[in-house]
Image (cartoon, helix red, strand yellow):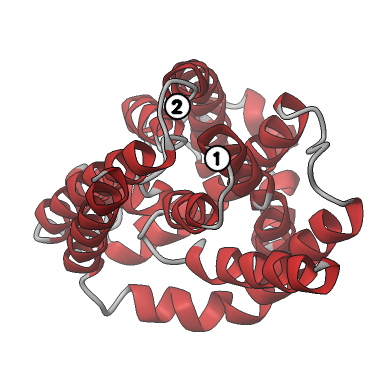
């Protein structure tokens, strides 16, 4: 039985490492799987958030060159020419997403404590459909333009990323979609979105772990194996899946996954 639980933990970690780079809400889909395996709604959400620590490690390793360049810009923050630099944009958006995410998480945990597994799956399905519709609308606005980031961009993206702590709301789909609607080209939108994912994933992972009390119902070996699997799978798949995500209409996929989740949740309730 322990071997089966270990295998499930590794599988969940691998799926997190793959889903994180696709705009289909890794948290939502992992929560659906964990709920279907008998976890409580609150535990499923907290555990899925915890696994973001693994993909945060993967993204840090993958983007280490760009992170180094951003750190090198820190001494220049005092000059006016850096008021709207990418570094300032990332700092402001991260702070705003942290505040928004904490508020959304408090609401989320209180709400799911009143739900059974079937209702949670239906809720995630509805949010997946909404995410898919948003992605479809924003992708039609993609432009190949170059522009400087602004504080308004950081505010909008920060709020969108914070709200993406809700399972079923894709973080990358939301942030990339907002940037596209603000007139950024697809390459720039993806780059900024994935750099933002690093502090967001670290915060989400720590929040899920600390708020659950360290997953007392999960064997440390299983939790550690899931985390390691998500980091390795995330690092090995990030380049391929990022290129794949730029070419595929994930809005439609989100809508289909959301519809299936709604149907599955309703069948559980009946």
What x and y, as percent, mark residue 127?
Answer: 26, 42
**Where is mark 1, residue-wise?**
45
What x and y, as percent, mark residue 116?
Answer: 42, 34
Q: Quadrant of the N terminus?
A: bottom right
Left or right position of 132 against 82? left
Q: Is residue 62 visible?
A: no
Q: Nearer the viewer, residue 91 or 49?
A: 49
Instruction: Please report the residue visible at 27 percent of the width from the left and 79 percent of the height from the top.
Output: 247
Instruction: Please report the residue visible at 55 percent of the width from the left and 49 percent of the height from the top.
Output: 197
**Snapshot quadrant of residue 162:** top left
Marks 2 and 1 close (CB-CB < 8 Å): yes
Q: Nearer the viewer, residue 80 or 231?
A: 231
Instruction: Please report the residue visible at 20 percent of the width from the left and 71 percent of the height from the top.
Output: 249
Q: Is residue 107 visible?
A: yes
**10 Å neighbourhood of mark 2: few (<14), some, or many (≥20)?**
some
What x and y, as percent, mark residue 89?
Answer: 49, 35
**Where is mark 2, residue-wise?**
112
Vertical placement of residue 16 versus 110, above or below: below
Q: Of tags 2 and 1, which is closer to the observer?
A: 2
Instruction: Please report the residue visible at 75 percent of the width from the left and 34 percent of the height from the top.
Output: 75
């Amino acid at each position: 039985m322990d071997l089966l639980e270990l295998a499930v933990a590794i599988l969940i970690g691998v799926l997190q490492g793959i889903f994180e780079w696709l705009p289909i809400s890794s948290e939502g889909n992992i929560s659906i799987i964990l709920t279907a395996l008998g976890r409580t709604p609150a535990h499923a959400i907290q555990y899925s958030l915890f696994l973001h620590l693994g993909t945060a490690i993967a993204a840090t390793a993958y983007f280490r060159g760009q992170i180094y360049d951003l750190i090198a810009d820190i001494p220049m923050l005092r000059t006016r020419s850096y008021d709207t630099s990418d570094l300032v944009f990332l700092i402001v958006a991260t702070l705003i997403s942290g505040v928004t995410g904490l508020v959304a998480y408090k609401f989320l945990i209180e709400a799911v404590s009143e739900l059974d597994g079937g209702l949670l799956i239906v809720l995630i399905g509805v949010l997946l459909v909404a995410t898919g519709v948003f992605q479809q609308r924003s992708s039609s606005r993609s432009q190949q333009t170059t522009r400087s980031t602004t504080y308004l961009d950081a505010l909008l993206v920060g709020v969108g990323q914070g709200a993406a702590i809700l399972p079923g709301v894709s973080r990358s789909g939301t942030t990339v979609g907002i940037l596209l609607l603000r007139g950024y080209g697809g390459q720039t939108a993806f780059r900024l979105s994935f750099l933002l994912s690093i502090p967001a994933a670290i915060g989400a992972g720590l929040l899920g772990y600390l708020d659950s009390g360290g997953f007392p119902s999960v064997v440390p070996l299983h939790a550690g194996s899931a985390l390691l699997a998500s980091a390795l799978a995330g690092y090995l798949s990030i380049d391929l899946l990022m290129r794949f995500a730029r070419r595929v209409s994930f809005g439609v996929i989100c809508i289909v996954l959301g519809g299936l989740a709604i149907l599955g949740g309703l069948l559980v309730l009946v």
